[in-house]
Amino acid sequence: MGDNSTTDFRRLVMFAMLLALVLVLVVAGLRVDDDPTGSGEDQASLSEPTAVAVAATPTPTPTPTPDPGWVDPASFGEPYGEIVEGLLTFRGNPTRSFYGRGAPQSPRVAWSFPPPTEDPLCSTSTTGPMGTVATTTWCGTGWTGQPAIFVRDARTWVVFGSFGSAVHFVDGVSGQRILPDFPVGDIIKGSVTVDPDGFPIVYFGSRDNKLRAVSFDGAEPEELWSIDAEDFAPILHDNDWDGAPLVIDDYLFEGGENSRWFAVKLNRGYDQVTNRVTVDPEVVVNIAAWTDELLEAVGDDNVSIENSVAISGDTIYFANGGGLIQGWDISDLEIGTQPTKTFEFWAGDDIDASLVIDEEGMIYAGVEWERANERGREVGQIIKLDPSQPDDPLIWSLAARVRLPDGVWATPAVTDTMVYVPTNEGFIKGIDRTTGELVWEKKLQGPVWSSPAVVDELLILPDCVGTIHAWDVSDPTIDPPEVWTANTTWCTESTVAIWDGLMVVGDRKGRVWAFTD
């Protein structure tokens, strides 16, 4: 048996340790429960005031503003930036959805160009594949042929290319030349683009194979730069440049009838000695716009890009002569990453009309009816696409064919509620933008290749006998009444340009007409 005193000592130690453990647990409990009495007061407050630490309210982390990319989709229907006031490119902006401002209400002829003492704007041009080459005389302005109207040094400038194989710089009030004409080696069918950042440069292409940048800050226009469509390989079909380029953040974007599309870093600036504008361009994108599958499907090599490229967000959109609608991601172009194709849809037939992109990113396209293939019959000639659903993008479509050829050469006009589309046969169709329902249609003297403009709730469109029609589309649910007409002297396939009461358009007889109230 052990010593009783030792046992008692051990018991005393164990009791002390147990008491200490209880005290620790009680203190811990008091720290967990600030009010063990249930009185609703902190124990410290019963004796003397004590500073109480209050947790700071977390500062909300702001939601990042989404990067709109190269072109904010919300700019649908808005002018091409805020630096240069005017209508600067075909259909006014990068989504090809701005039609001008200040439509005349009772237009009359203010001037015509060239002056009556000069010959009409005409020259010869040779076209056709080998073995069927033909040389013909072309007069006036063509498809798309929309003038640029803009304000520079408090003066209204009108700049346009013509079948006279030149670009013209005209005073919007008098119709007189501001600068001498800038001649090129062949006709100019398409629209020019004036630099939206205020550099005195106009960009345009011609049937002489060249895409050019020309300055207008001197006594006469001067070529700053050009590229030749035949300097690239491989190319298919042709060497013209019909599309109006886009210029964004010192980059130029363009598609060519050589069936390739391009991005060019312009490196714009000014000479420190002469203070004249300069460029030092570098072609950074040069991509074929066709696939072997497309060539096999259409059975020919007409895969040229005749429409004017459109940009929304970080995607550049265009279509080609094989009917392939494409979207290419250009988000990282400025850090040297080459674009990748993110969307394609085959419509079956030639698409010369430019694509229009709305504020939701939807694509509106007009398709020709020339090949008369099964795909064109299935898809139709007026279509709306959702590129965010690449596996099944077709939202709605309408047929627009009476005979062969037919379909759509003009670029649709898209508003908040409606889509307006002319056809080669001479119909103008008013279509509900959401449902694709045909709300009304009218028959004009066709073919109608001019793209309609919607300004101040007037739908304005020339026909092929030289009549410019204006309909009141303030109520999109009804067949719109005609409110006025104006007249050129001949078939008019160019698109009207409208700015602050001035309306300018060229006909196919050799003259450009200006109308005001």
Image (tube, rainbow, N blue to C red):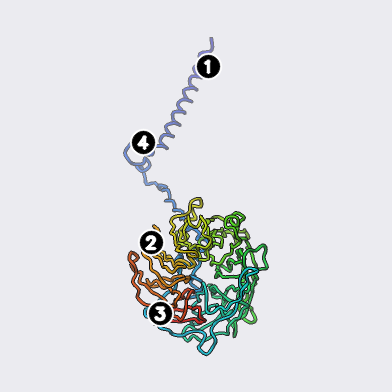
Q: Is residue 206 above or below residue 119?
A: above
Name the amino acid type tagged 4: Pro
Q: CA distance from mark 2 to mark 1?
A: 108 Å
Quarter the C terminus occupies = bottom left
Spatial distance from mark 4 to mark 2, Cα to Cα? 77 Å
Residue 109's x, y, as percent? 43, 84
- Inspect the image, locate mark 2, and give the three-letter code of the amino acid beneath it: Leu
Mark 1 lies on residue: 6
Q: Disc 2 vs disc 1: Cβ atoms closer than 8 Å?
A: no
* Horizontal side of residue 99 vs 285, given as left or right: left
Q: Amino acid at mark 1?
A: Thr
Say what secondary structure mark 4 lies in.
Answer: loop
Residue identified by numbered label 4: 36
Q: For mark 3, what is the residue? A: 486
Label 1 to label 3, Cα distance in Å? Answer: 124 Å
| Mark positioned earlier in the residue sequence (1 or 3) | 1
Secondary structure type for disc 2 = strand
Of circles 1 and 3, the one toward us is: 3
Give the residue pinned by disc 2.
Answer: 438
Find numbered disc 1 in the image and state the secondary structure of the residue it sits on: helix
Contact, mark 1 vs mark 3 (Cβ under 8 Å): no
Residue 79 in sight from this viewpoint: no
Which residue is at the front of the view, 98 or 235? 235
- Farthest left residue in view: 39
> Which label lies toward us, 2 or 1?
2
Spatial CA distance of label 4 from label 1 is 41 Å
Query: Can residue 65 be seen?
Result: yes
- For disc 4, the neighbor class at 10 Å (few under 14, some 14 to 19, many from 20) is some
The alpha-carbon separation of the residues under discs 4 and 3 comes to 92 Å
Quarter occupied by residue 221: bottom right
